[in-house]
Structures are given as structure tokens and as C-alpha cells.
Amino acid sequence: MFTMHRRTLLAAAIATTLLGACSKQAPAFKAVDITGAEYATGFNLTDHNGQKRTLADFKGKAVVIFFGYTQCPDVCPTSMTELAQAKQLLGPDGDKLQGLFISVDPERDTPEVMKAYMASFDPTFLALYAPAGELPEVARQFKIYYKKVDGPTPTSYTMDHAAGSYVYDTQGRIRLYHRYGSGAQALADDVKLLLAE
């Protein structure tokens, strides 16, 4: 009887261990996990220094991509400030985070304007641009929305645009969609998880 009871307990312990090993828990990201998405998988764009860039250039770093424009009054500066704060929160790992800003306003966002704009947040962040004729295809590939909204003068228009950020792991794979206003700490925590993989 005693031996039978021990065998039952031993079998239960082994089963529990095996089940625990099989059901390895996925990281608890704060952002929306879009691992395996078939969109936002890459780009071939020019940065504000005139250099052609692809995701492969940033292998070994977590990459955060935000679409916006330099004359944006609120959403863009808020998001870029949040990204810069997340980099600071990472401490020594901050240099493993690459911020990328893709302009939806090729008319006004010249390389010089974008370079100055990036420097006001973090000098290591890069702004990327597509010529006006190519921007619709880039937006389609990333499933982002943007639309020109006329202002009182031809040059005082604004741009409606998607406000979240895409987050990539160190292998250049799309992993997360970080919602606007989620906070620098949430972004930093998610990047830490990606860097630890």
C-alpha cells in the first residue's frame, strides 16, 4: 500500500514537471504582441544623412519605428520624447535601442529639417524618408494611415496619421505594436524582454 502511494506521488510529480516544461510561458509584453505578422517586415529608405537603410543595418538592436512629421503639434513630439525616455530607462542597454522616425510629410520634411528634429530627442535616432510617389506603398506595407489636411495657407497643412510604434527584436523581426500614450516605462520593459531573448 505504502509503495503504491509512493509510486502515485512520484508519477504525479513527474507529470507536473513535464507539463511545466511543455508550457513555457511567453513573455508578458505590455504592448500588443504581433509576432509573425506579415506586414511591417522591412524597408529600404534613405536616412537624414543620405544613407540607404534597411532593418539589417540594425541587427543586434531592438528597433522602434514611428511614422510622423516634424511639424506635428502633439502626437509626434510626445511619442519621440517617450522613446528617448525609454532609451534612458534602459541604462547601459540604451545603446541597444534604435529609434527610427519615418516621415509622412515628404513635402516639408527635408533631410536637414529631420536631422535637427531627431537631435532634439536623441542624436542617435534616425529619420527616414520616402519620396512622395513611394510613400503610399511604404504606408501600405506597414498598414499605417496618413492623410493631408488642408490649412488656411498652402504650407500650413497638417497630417492625420497613425500614432502607434512598431517594435522589432534584435534579429529584425516584427514583434510588438506599442500604442500611443502607453508610456516610456512600458516600452522600456518590453524592449528589456526582447533584449533578453
Image: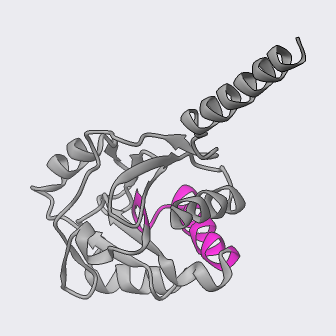
Figure check: 122 above or below 75: below
The structure residue drawn at horizontal position 43% and vertical position 49%, both measured from the top left corner, is: 175
Residue 55 appears left or right of 165: left
Query: What is the x, y in percent for residue 190?
Result: 60, 57
Q: Residue furthest left?
A: 133
Q: Is residue 79 magenta?
A: yes
Q: Is residue 25 magenta?
A: no
Out of 196 and 11, give the one closest to the viewer: 11
The structure residue drawn at horizontal position 67% and vertical position 82%, both measured from the top left corner, is: 91
Q: Quadrant of residue 196?
A: bottom right
The range drawn in magenta is: 63-89
Residue 186 appears left or right of 21: right
Query: What is the x, y in percent for residue 50?
Result: 19, 85
Out of 134 and 26, give the one closest to the viewer: 26
The structure residue drawn at horizontal position 37% and vertical position 55%, both measured from the top left corner, is: 157
Q: Quadrant of residue 2?
A: top right
Q: Quadrant of residue 168?
A: bottom left
Query: What is the x, y in percent for residue 55?
Result: 27, 67
Out of 128 and 156, give the one closest to the viewer: 128
The structure residue drawn at horizontal position 42% and vertical position 86%, both measured from the top left corner, is: 116
Quarter of the image that includes the N terminus: top right
Figure check: 30 above or below 88: above
- What colour scheme has been applied to the protein in the rendered image? one colour
Q: Residue furthest top?
A: 1
All told, the count of numbered labels is 0
Query: What is the x, y in percent for residue 58?
Result: 33, 75
